[in-house]
Amino acid sequence: MVLRFNGAQLLTIMILAPLLTHLHGITGAALSVVLAAIIRDVGMGLLLPSKLGLAAGVWSRRGTRRAMELAMAKLGA
Protein backbone atom coordinates (compact mmCIF):
# COMPACT_ATOMS: atom_id res chain seq x y z
CA MET A 1 0.00 0.00 0.00
CA VAL A 2 2.82 2.40 0.86
CA LEU A 3 4.46 1.61 -2.48
CA ARG A 4 1.22 2.49 -4.29
CA PHE A 5 0.91 5.83 -2.56
CA ASN A 6 4.56 6.66 -3.12
CA GLY A 7 4.01 5.77 -6.76
CA ALA A 8 0.98 8.05 -6.86
CA GLN A 9 3.10 10.81 -5.36
CA LEU A 10 5.81 10.31 -7.97
CA LEU A 11 3.27 10.23 -10.80
CA THR A 12 1.66 13.43 -9.50
CA ILE A 13 5.03 15.18 -9.45
CA MET A 14 5.92 13.90 -12.91
CA ILE A 15 2.66 15.25 -14.33
CA LEU A 16 2.27 18.49 -12.40
CA ALA A 17 5.88 19.66 -12.04
CA PRO A 18 6.52 20.40 -15.73
CA LEU A 19 3.12 22.00 -16.16
CA LEU A 20 3.19 24.15 -13.03
CA THR A 21 6.87 25.03 -13.50
CA HIS A 22 6.09 26.30 -16.96
CA LEU A 23 3.15 28.36 -15.66
CA HIS A 24 4.54 29.63 -12.34
CA GLY A 25 8.26 28.90 -12.24
CA ILE A 26 9.86 27.55 -9.09
CA THR A 27 6.69 28.30 -7.12
CA GLY A 28 4.77 25.95 -9.40
CA ALA A 29 7.38 23.23 -8.94
CA ALA A 30 7.13 23.58 -5.16
CA LEU A 31 3.34 23.49 -5.37
CA SER A 32 3.47 20.23 -7.32
CA VAL A 33 5.62 18.65 -4.59
CA VAL A 34 3.25 19.87 -1.87
CA LEU A 35 0.18 18.57 -3.71
CA ALA A 36 1.86 15.20 -4.28
CA ALA A 37 2.75 14.94 -0.58
CA ILE A 38 -0.84 15.78 0.37
CA ILE A 39 -2.15 13.06 -1.93
CA ARG A 40 0.23 10.52 -0.40
CA ASP A 41 -0.31 11.50 3.22
CA VAL A 42 -4.08 11.87 3.09
CA GLY A 43 -4.46 8.63 1.16
CA MET A 44 -2.33 6.64 3.57
CA GLY A 45 -3.91 8.38 6.53
CA LEU A 46 -7.35 7.25 5.39
CA LEU A 47 -6.58 3.74 4.18
CA LEU A 48 -3.86 2.41 6.48
CA PRO A 49 -6.01 2.41 9.63
CA SER A 50 -8.74 0.44 7.90
CA LYS A 51 -6.38 -2.02 6.18
CA LEU A 52 -3.83 -2.56 8.96
CA GLY A 53 -5.65 -1.40 12.06
CA LEU A 54 -3.04 1.21 12.86
CA ALA A 55 -3.90 3.82 15.47
CA ALA A 56 -3.98 7.47 14.55
CA GLY A 57 -0.70 9.34 15.02
CA VAL A 58 -0.12 11.92 17.69
CA TRP A 59 -0.61 14.80 15.22
CA SER A 60 -3.89 13.48 13.86
CA ARG A 61 -7.19 14.99 14.97
CA ARG A 62 -7.88 12.07 17.26
CA GLY A 63 -4.36 12.09 18.69
CA THR A 64 -4.46 15.85 19.24
CA ARG A 65 -7.86 15.58 20.92
CA ARG A 66 -6.57 12.85 23.24
CA ALA A 67 -3.50 14.92 24.08
CA MET A 68 -5.67 17.95 24.90
CA GLU A 69 -7.98 15.84 27.07
CA LEU A 70 -5.00 14.45 28.96
CA ALA A 71 -3.50 17.92 29.40
CA MET A 72 -6.81 19.33 30.64
CA ALA A 73 -7.22 16.42 33.07
CA LYS A 74 -3.70 17.00 34.42
CA LEU A 75 -4.44 20.71 34.85
CA GLY A 76 -7.70 19.93 36.60
CA ALA A 77 -9.74 22.04 34.19
Image (cartoon, rainbow, N blue to C red):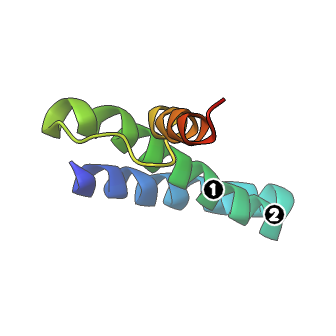
Residue at the (33%, 50%) spot, across then down:
5
Give the mark toward the camera: 2 or 1: 1
In which image quadrant can residue 72 be found?
top right
Provide the residue designation for mark 2: 27
Q: Secondary structure at mark 1?
A: helix
In the image, residue 60 above or below residue 6: above
Residue 19 position within the rendered picture, expressed as x and y whole percent measured from the top left: 68, 55
Q: Amino acid at mark 1?
A: Val
Q: Amino acid at mark 2?
A: Thr
Q: Nearer the viewer, residue 2 or 74?
A: 74
Task: Name the residue furthest bottom.
Answer: 26
Q: Nearer the viewer, residue 49 or 44?
A: 49
Q: Say which mark, if any, is on residue 10.
A: none
Number of labelled discs?
2
| Left or right placement of residue 6 versus residue 2 in this view | right
Residue 33 position within the rendered picture, expressed as x and y whole percent measured from the top left: 60, 61
In the image, residue 38 above or below residue 50: below
Residue at the (29%, 34%) spot, across then down:
47
First in sequence, mark 2 or 1: give its number.
Answer: 2
Q: Residues within 10 Å of mark 2 (few under 14, many from 20)?
A: few
| Left or right placement of residue 32 versus residue 25 in this view | left
Quadrant including the C terminus:
top right
Provide the residue designation for mark 1: 34
Q: Nearer the viewer, residue 14 or 60?
A: 60
State yes or no: discs 2 and 1 in contact (Cβ < 8 Å): no
Spatial CA span between label 2 and label 1: 11 Å
Task: Name the residue furthest front.
Answer: 76
